Image (spheres, rainbow, N blue to C red):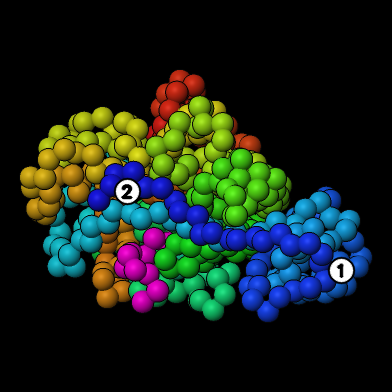
Amino acid sequence: MSRKFVPMLMCVLVIILMGVSVVGAANPVRSYLILANGTSFPSNLNAQVTAAGGQLTRVMPQVGIAVAQSANPNFTTSLQGVRSVVPNLSLQWVPDTRVVVLDENVVNPPNAVEDDVRYNLQWNHDSVNSREAWNAGQRGAGVVVAVLDTGFLLNHPDLAANIIGSASFVPGESAQYNVALDPRRFSHGTHTAGTIAAPDNGIGGIGIAPDAKIVAVKVLSDAGSGEFDWIINGILYAANRGDVDIINMSLGGTLLKSGIPGEYTAREAAELLVALSRATTYATQRGVTVIASAGNDSIDLDHSANVITVPAQSTNVITIAATAPVGWAIDPTVNLYRPSSYTNFGRSAIDFGAPGGDFAYPGNENCLVAGLVRPCWVFDMVLSTANAANGAPAYSWAAGTSMASPAAAGVAAIIIGANGGSMNPAQVKTELLRRALGNGNNPYFGGGNIQTGY
């Protein structure tokens, strides 16, 4: 398997014809985002959409975005008094991920320092100093994290107690993970949620902020694809709940600033970034800290002028790259802060590094860790809640900036909890920077490596 994963864009073909009134029967119905000038739409927006052969399906006045469907190939140029009309692209927001499922018949490992039986497999806690925070009484109590992702095993025994709500913005799919809809048979959303807040219950792994609560928000199909408006709706839902402190988005897509002929133009790429930025800014203004993964394309974002990564480069987002050891199973004192082989990087676009795991260890020999024998490289990945191939609750190792972002969200939850459960996003980012390991000007990770500070 390649060690470089590139999110794939699902093509949306826009055919430009002369005239706006003739819609051929062969033209497919497409989804569009309509961006207002500011937050105010023309009073006759619905009439305009109808006259252009479309149907208005949703209006989000908080951010001046509406969603419409139309088979009119000229729909993007048919409306007056709006900022832009752009294709509501569907992207593969979660790239193919290397996953190793942990067997179910795991016994309590020898010399465990915590009663959660898989704790000794979770090197990511050492990376951010989770245990030191727990010993100081800081475990994320009173903090709510909205996890925007694929579906979730809502009844996972090592996660369910901390899930206080769920919602889905994927048409026809509930928030509950469905293994039949996922060709990888890996519950990405369950894995990220467990990294943040798997409870300290003695039955499995443990999250970085085990007393925090989770709102599970499905914004992608279980296969990892989704439209821009699904994510925007999820952000608005989380921001408007009133109890959410943090949004974690372990998802990302790559657009070219120059556009791709037949898929989207340069202006449309820029407007899609504006659309997501309106949502992330709205959440920030509502007091919600927004954290997102940087992407797994090995892109130097300091020197890649034609690339837009979303939502990582959206306004007010704290963007997280991935770190990992190589050969941790052989030497637990090995450097935990090495940039992962696949991570996007660059101080101009990345705020912090956090444990995301890797599979760069060159050999394939076995190692013994906490009573388990696996190839040594497996232990360099991140272990968290997931599912077995039949969809039953299980645990999996995985690697990606998708695993790093929830680690940062867990640390942010500890910080907010230590402040009495209330901090504005600027305060959270300042405190993350103060506690980070590094000089605040890391060439890979900007502010340095995420730490609890204890």
In the displayed structure, would residue 45 be above or below residue 40? Answer: below
Number of callouts: 2
Would residue 384 be counted in the magenta stretch?
Answer: no
Task: Assess disc 1: are there few (<14), some (14-19) or many (≥20) residues with their C-alpha within 10 Å of its C-alpha.
Answer: some
Q: What main secondary structure does the magenta stretch of the protein show?
A: loop
In the displayed structure, would residue 437 be above or below residue 396? Answer: above
User: Disc 1 vs disc 2: which is toward the camera?
Assistant: 1
- Callout 2, which amino acid? Ala
Query: In the rendered view, does 405 fall on the left or right side of 156?
Result: right
Q: Which residue is mark 1?
A: 48
Q: Position of residue 323 (x, y in %)?
A: 35, 37
Q: Position of residue 344 (x, y in %)?
A: 43, 37
Quarter of the image where the C terminus is located? top left
Q: Which residue is mark 2?
A: 399
Q: Quadrant of residue 362?
A: top left
Q: What element does badge 1 sit on?
A: helix
Q: Quadrant of residue 416?
A: top right
Residue range corresponding to the magenta coloring: 180-189
- Callout 1, which amino acid? Gln
**1 and 2 marks in contact (CB < 8 Å):** no
Q: CA distance from mark 1 to mark 2?
A: 47 Å
In the displayed structure, would residue 157 be above or below residue 368? Answer: below
